[in-house]
Amino acid sequence: MSKNLAIVGVTGAVGQEFIKILEQRNFPVKSIKMLASARSLGKTQKFKGKDYPVEELTQNCFKGVDIALFSAGASRSREFADAAVKAGAVVVDNSSAFRMVPEIPLVVPEVNPEDIKKHKGIIANPNCSTIIANVPIWPLHKANPIKRMVVSTYQAVSGAGQAGMTELFNQTKEILEGKNPTMNKFKYQIAFNIFSHDSAVGPNGYNEEEMKMVKETRKIFHCDEIAITCTCVRIPVPRCHCESINLEFKDSITPDEVRKLLEHAPGVTVLDDQKNNRFPMPIDADGNDDVYVGRIRQDESLPDHKGINLWVSGDQIRKGAALNAVQIAEKL
Amino acid sequence: MSKNLAIVGVTGAVGQEFIKILEQRNFPVKSIKMLASARSLGKTQKFKGKDYPVEELTQNCFKGVDIALFSAGASRSREFADAAVKAGAVVVDNSSAFRMVPEIPLVVPEVNPEDIKKHKGIIANPNCSTIIANVPIWPLHKANPIKRMVVSTYQAVSGAGQAGMTELFNQTKEILEGKNPTMNKFKYQIAFNIFSHDSAVGPNGYNEEEMKMVKETRKIFHCDEIAITCTCVRIPVPRCHCESINLEFKDSITPDEVRKLLEHAPGVTVLDDQKNNRFPMPIDADGNDDVYVGRIRQDESLPDHKGINLWVSGDQIRKGAALNAVQIAEKL
């Protein structure tokens, strides 16, 4: 049952996390190909104690590969995924390239694992903030349909890759030394500052990150009726996204019912210690598989106890990207 | 028309801002008393180029004072406000001590200046996050009643005073040097991390900061029907709060209508450049009087164009505290 793997974009933040997770979960690997752009040639990548040369991503590099884990950006996915499929591989793609293509499954294994088997060579991995919201709200939605959700995100810089983290630390040092912060990766200062998410803003005023939450959630839940509005914000945290989620349900629901549903939900850890003001923080989720959920409260601004507020934190490189993709690969 | 002033808590973050604003706005000062606790005795405070000794806050220190600006915490306000009133002063109190006392006016000068004249010696200054939300939403509420609002805050550490800022910078240095961060002011790490607001959590699961937004807004707007739910979060930013505000109106409203109302609203600067992804950030509001508003979008999750999303940033030491109090004093 061992598989021949290829990691596309192995030198990136998610690529590195693929390696870590495959090792930690003892994924049955027969062979593994480390793929990146030509400028990474000459580098090596360790896997289970052995050094592998980084090879160039080309149209002909997928011979013999069973599963190709892609995380090299949407344009690379569009350019090379077909070649991988033609060579006989199943592509699990972490980019936005194929997520909204109707015939390509978009999968969160805790939500819609049954969609995996509908694939025709490509399975899309959802956006990080979508995955982190969907894992805890799906068990609630199954018990009592969610009619509307209002989400505000607090997103870590590494959602923009390793360059985002480097920028945060460099700018922080500059400011502490009394210098002006240098902008490379982001257009605006991120150290000791926050800004509206750095994805393009569409004609409706929403940025791409916000529209991903809306469209992807509906596709994953197979529920076009769920009304979603979202505000995405970048904050000076290296890793792990948080989200403030306001939910309106079809029927009444209590915080205790929500807590019980979440305590039994796969991929969720409830951290809701009101007495000690101890709720999910980015440093809790860092390096962990689960989405942490707390601040479970009745929203009294809605009638008939139909509203609930939640606060979640999840590792967006891990569950928000690499882990979710590896979980899909495991189910293949 | 010059007034004899007393600044209670002059050595704190808001106290220092009082001094700056009184100078900048050329407030007509006949005399000024710099008051603080006994441990600040021996210090001096500059005002318009002159040094004043810091005097001890006592029951007998308010003789001859016309207006006392209090910002020394709720327990000091409870202990000393009556003495100031008995000595003939009008107290503008920045603490939470008197905000919800029915006969004490709670005032945002852009919203309910007419309440000032109802005072019987004390006027309460609202909480910072309430003021920053209320200034931009009031002109909208007047044009089209707000039925419900869902707010998520991104609050700077200096909301917890100068000690909050010191903690952020110290922890940041420690982490950059590879050390463990030291917790003094806050219970949990704030550098490169965020946490649910550090005020006490009540039996309904909401912290005090969140309930202030709910109760104070209703009192200031003289509108008990407005439904409000709020999630308050502390972020690693030294100064200026941001808020993601989702509004449901009684009648349909377009983003253009909102933009027009806000462009003519006192105390508001619209910064809503969708093309350049240029929206309000903490560093925009820092040191400025106005609340900055952007990301004005139709919320398509509500029917009939009754929903609007906003993003605001305001200097919580300035408009969120000291400036608002000085504006009240000006109207006296």
Image (cartoon, coloured by chain):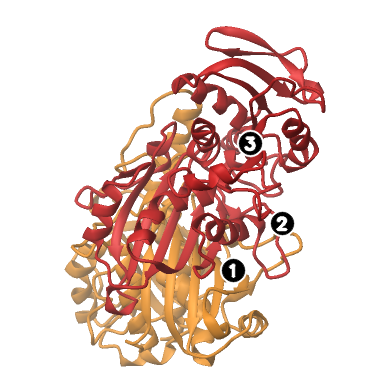
Chain colours: A orange, B red
Q: Closer to the camera: disc 1 or disc 3?
A: 3
- B125, above or below B84, in the image: below
Nearest the viewer among A140 and A78 is A140
Could you tell whether A275 is left or right of B95 in the image?
right
Query: Does residue A257 appear anywhere in the picture?
Result: yes
Count residues near mark 3 (Cα–Cα under 10 Å), then give few for <14, some for 14-19, many for 20+: some
- As drawn, the label of residue B161 is 3
- B178, above or below A275, in the image: above
Count residues near mark 2 (Cα–Cα under 10 Å), then give few for <14, some for 14-19, many for 20+: some
Q: CA distance from mark 1 to mark 3?
A: 30 Å
In the structure shown, which secondary structural element does the residue marked by tag 3 occupy? loop
Residue B17 position by quadrant: top right
Q: Quadrant of the C terminus of chain A?
A: bottom left
The residue wearing badge 1 is: A292
- As drawn, the label of residue B200 is 2
Could you tell whether B72 is left or right of B152 in the image?
right
Q: CA distance from mark 1 to mark 2?
A: 21 Å
Please name the residue shown 71% across and 42% down the image.
Answer: B183
- B241, above or below B218, in the image: above
Q: Chain of mark 1?
A: A
Please name the residue shown 59% across and 83% down the image.
Answer: A265
| Residue positioned most to the top | B50
